[in-house]
Image (cartoon, rainbow, N blue to C red):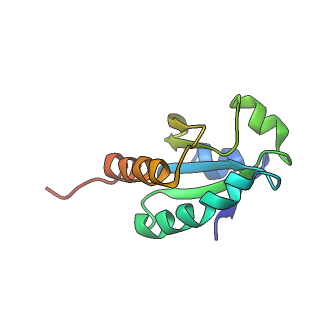
Amino acid sequence: MILSVNEKSFPKLVLESSRPVLVYFWAPWCGLCRLIQPTLLSWQNDCQGAIQLVAVNADDNFKLANSFRLRSLPTLILFDQGVPVHRLEEIHSREELQQTLRLIVKNQIPRSA
């Protein structure tokens, strides 16, 4: 299950988080949002807690969605120490999403020396 975040909880759960957070902006009417959710859930399990995944319903949190100037849904924004460091919009395929998620993990999870 993906943790749901709203305008009130966003600062604490995303901006003040000690670990990277991938924010998944979605809406109930968005068919592509529903299609990518299983991929995101699988990715969340693969991360083993190194990167937090949260969801923001863009319809219910318009101010928050507007503050990040969403142009399409779904939109994924990776935050590290409260700063947006990667943004994925206009997802064209499940393969593209999986490749991007693998790169996020590779770049965010520290490797043992």
Horizontally, residue 78 falls left or right of residue 103, namely: right
Quadrant housing the C terminus: bottom left
Name the residue nearer the viewer: 53 or 72.
72
Q: Position of residue 46 (x, y in %)?
A: 41, 67
The residue shown at (53%, 63%) is 39
- Residue at image location 38% in from the left, 53% down from the top: 102
Quadrant holding the N terminus: bottom right
As rendered, which of 13 and 39 lies closer to the eye?
39
Above or below, comparing residue 52 to residue 73 in the picture: below
Q: Is 2 displayed left or right of 46 in the figure? A: right
- Residue 30: x percent and y percent? 76, 51
Residue at the extreme front of the image, as rendered = 93
Q: How many marks?
A: 0
Left or right: 38 in relation to 46: right
Figure check: 68 above or below 78: above
Residue 29, image x, y percentages: 82, 53
For this rendering, which residue is in front, 65 or 30? 30
Would you identify the image quadrant in which residue 71 lies? top right
71 up-or-down from 105: above or below: above
Q: Horizontal and vertical percent for residue 107? A: 33, 45
